[in-house]
Amino acid sequence: MTASGEFPVNSALSERELQIVDLVAAGLTNQEIATQLDISKRTVDNHISNILTKTGTDNRVALVRWALQWGKVCLDQVNCCVLPNRDAAAS
């Protein structure tokens, strides 16, 4: 968050980074994210660090606020948008 209280416009997050943002917003720990994605916790730690830098956020709470503001996550039918079906997009 900037000094004016606004979040900076994001640098492009990779598909994996967006996937991790979604799991952070769902309340998973780094170890739980690693287990779900079948990657190491250290890899998740690195992704989280990169995501925080790219989004200009300082912690997980600020990251979730950023993700909600920019429509990157949908929580309990709040801030939901229709996202393209990944299978259809790959076709």
Image (cartoon, rainbow, N blue to C red):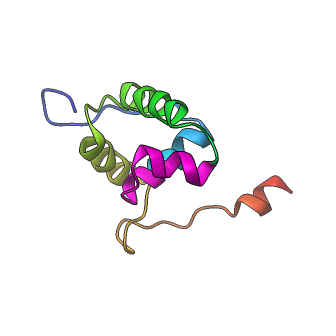
Q: Is residue 20 left or right of residue 6?
A: right
On the image, the x and y values in percent for residue 22 come to 47, 53
On the image, the x and y values in percent for residue 20 come to 50, 46
In the rendered image, the quadrant that contains the C terminus is bottom right
Per the rendered image, the range of residues in magenta is 23-37
Res 40 → quadrant: top right
User: In this orientation, which residue lies closer to the viewer: 83 or 76?
Assistant: 76
On the image, the x and y values in percent for residue 21 come to 45, 47
Where is 74 relative to 30, above or below?
below
Taking the spot 78% from the left edge, 62% from the top edge, the residue there is 88
Q: Is residue 89 left or right of residue 82?
A: right
Where is 74 relative to 7, above or below?
below
Taking the spot 40% from the left edge, 60% from the top edge, the residue there is 26
Task: Report the magenta stretch's main SS.
Answer: helix
Q: Is residue 52 left or right of residue 41?
A: left
Q: Is residue 53 magenta?
A: no
In the rendered image, the quadrant that contains the N terminus is top left
Taking the spot 50% from the left edge, 37% from the top edge, the residue there is 41
The residue most toward the left is 4
Q: Is residue 34 magenta?
A: yes
Q: Is residue 17 visible?
A: yes
